[in-house]
Image: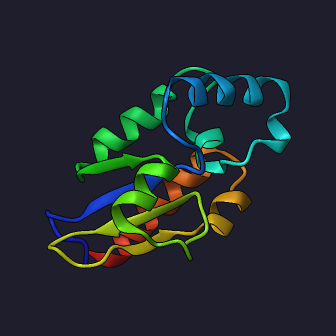
Amino acid sequence: MTSRTSTLIFIYNADGGVLDALGDMVHKIVSPATYPCSLCALTYGPVAMRGAWRRFLKRLGLPTLFLYRDEFRGELDRRDLALPAVLLGGDGEQPEIFVSAQELAALPDLAALMALIEMRIAARA
């Protein structure tokens, strides 16, 4: 069951920092098929979060946390988790996988990601 204190945790398969962001931007433009972060590719254009994604997250009404790979590894140290991933955490419990890296890679577009998240939240209600 998804509680009011549940948080969606989005972990990107990219490192944080200005130089990393610039490299990611170039990679997405030059060779999008080889870009290693399907979550980034679905939710971000070359330079900013997609408006539809931002509106979707606001409409969900759940807290969200966005972490880069290096931040996640430092905070939660789950080296066995394939990235990118979406976790669901709350109430001091260990976050659980909500959308796996394999599932993210198989999604054709942002609409499919939003539908999957909505379906999984509804299933927990």
Is residue 62 found left or right of 20 in the rendered image?
left
Residue 116 coordinates in the image, percent (x, y): 52, 62
Foreground of the two, 98 or 34: 34
Residue that appears at 76% across and 42% down: 35
> Toward the viewer: 10 or 69?
69
Label total for image:
0
x, y percent for residue 42: 62, 42
In this picture, is 108 found above or below 83?
above
Give the answer, above or below, for where 58 lies relative to 121: above
Residue 95 is situated, as x and y percent measured from the top left of the image, at 33, 73
- Residue appearing at x 54%, y 42% in the figure: 15
Quadrant of the rendering where the C terminus is positioned:
bottom left
Q: Relative to residue 43, is residue 121 depicted above or below?
A: below
Q: Nearer the viewer, residue 75 or 108?
A: 75
Q: How is the image coloured?
A: rainbow
Q: Residue at x 77, y 23 (%)?
A: 29
User: Dividing the image into 4 quarters, which one contains the N terminus?
Assistant: bottom left
Question: Relative to the observer, which residue lies in front, 48 or 18?
Answer: 18
Q: Position of residue 98 (x, y in %)?
A: 45, 70
Is residue 31 rendered to the left or right of residue 69?
right
